[in-house]
Amino acid sequence: MVVFLVRRTALFAASLFAASVLIFLLLQLLSGDMAQVIAGVQATPAQVASLRHELGTDRPLAVQYATWVGGVLAGDFGTSALSGVSVSAELGEKLTVTAPLVAVAMLLSVLVAVPLGVLAAIAHRRRLGVVISVGSQLGIALPTLWVGLVLAIVFAVWLRWLPAQGFPTAGWEQPVRAVRSLVLPAVTLALAEGAVLLRFVRSATLGVLNQDFLRTARATGLTRTGALLRHGLRNAALPVVSILGLQVAALLVGAVVVEAVFALPGVGQMLLTDVGNRDLVKVQGEVLLLTGAVLTIGFLVDVAHRLIDPRLRVSR
């Protein structure tokens, strides 16, 4: 296990390094002349040259990259070229919205999708199983944007139970208002991703139900459900854990849409605004942060596989 962790950590570090190089180079190709964008079309060549020197864009790319990565390793993602605000400080502030949103949406997805997926597999030849399967297919087909708008109309406009948009200015210093602001966005994300997760849980459980070891367990006197709960779920968990990792990554992407719909000041909304403003220093840090989060999830999924399945812990 120790050897595996060392190898997997090295792979994680190499992947993150490669991603940082790719992000930096692609944004350099797409950005054009940042100094010219900031200075405007009326600026003189001398003013543009002075601004390039101030921004550091007149230095070799290798030096610019080393400076940026060195800052990131020290926890400094740079300073916005347009507003002069620290990117690290702003990311930390926006994560107080995005991180709880994604966490709650993931929790809701698991709490609903896993038991319903198992139930749909056990009852796959009965009416209940068919209803659950049809409902999950419908959840996959519906666009997240449309679901969010419908939930906002029903629960915010018609019933007036929850706010339709926004987040309290004081943030989590007003916990009740903050939680109420995240309910509809979290449910919107959970419905979309939970439907996908439910289908995978159903498929994984059906695969286990047909295995020989489960028939042997039933031959000892256990019911079909009892054998599944006692012996089958651990085997079904492996593919489900893999999908959970992908689901968290999908939630991070989906948060960009949901934050726009519900006007939440999170990382997704920040990224959309900065892309529109061509504030590429901030975009660079935001994309690297999201990439690092996805790679971290992949790392944790691999570790979880080793913990769940003893066969994977055998040294090779």
Image (cartoon, rainbow, N blue to C red):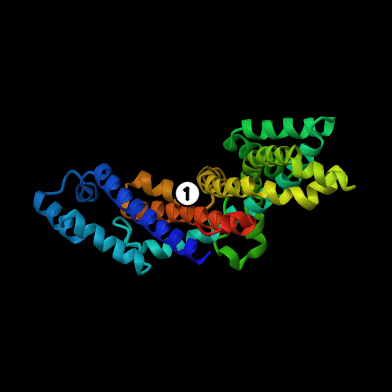
**CA neighbours of label 1 inside 10 A, class few (<14), some (14 to 19), many (20+):** many
Image position, residue 198 (x, y; %)? 69, 40
Residue 40 shows in this picture: yes
Q: Identify the residue at horizontal 52%, vertical 42% (top origin).
A: 257
- Kindly identify the amino acid type of the residue bearing the numbered disc 1: Gln
Q: Identify the residue at horizontal 35%, vertical 69% (top origin).
A: 74
Image position, residue 113 (x, y; %)? 71, 44
Judged left or right of residue 88, residue 159 is right
Judged left or right of residue 242, residue 207 is right
Q: Identify the residue at horizontal 52%, vertical 59% (top origin).
A: 315
Residue 266 shows in this picture: no
Image position, residue 314 (x, y; %)? 56, 58
Q: Tell me which corner region of the image, top left, top right, bottom left or bottom right, holds residue 142.
A: top right
The answer to whether 101 is drawn above or below residue 86 in the figure is above
Question: Observer-nearest residue: 8 or 110?
Answer: 8
The answer to whether 136 is drawn above or below residue 264 in the figure is above
Tell me the residue that label 1 is attached to: 269
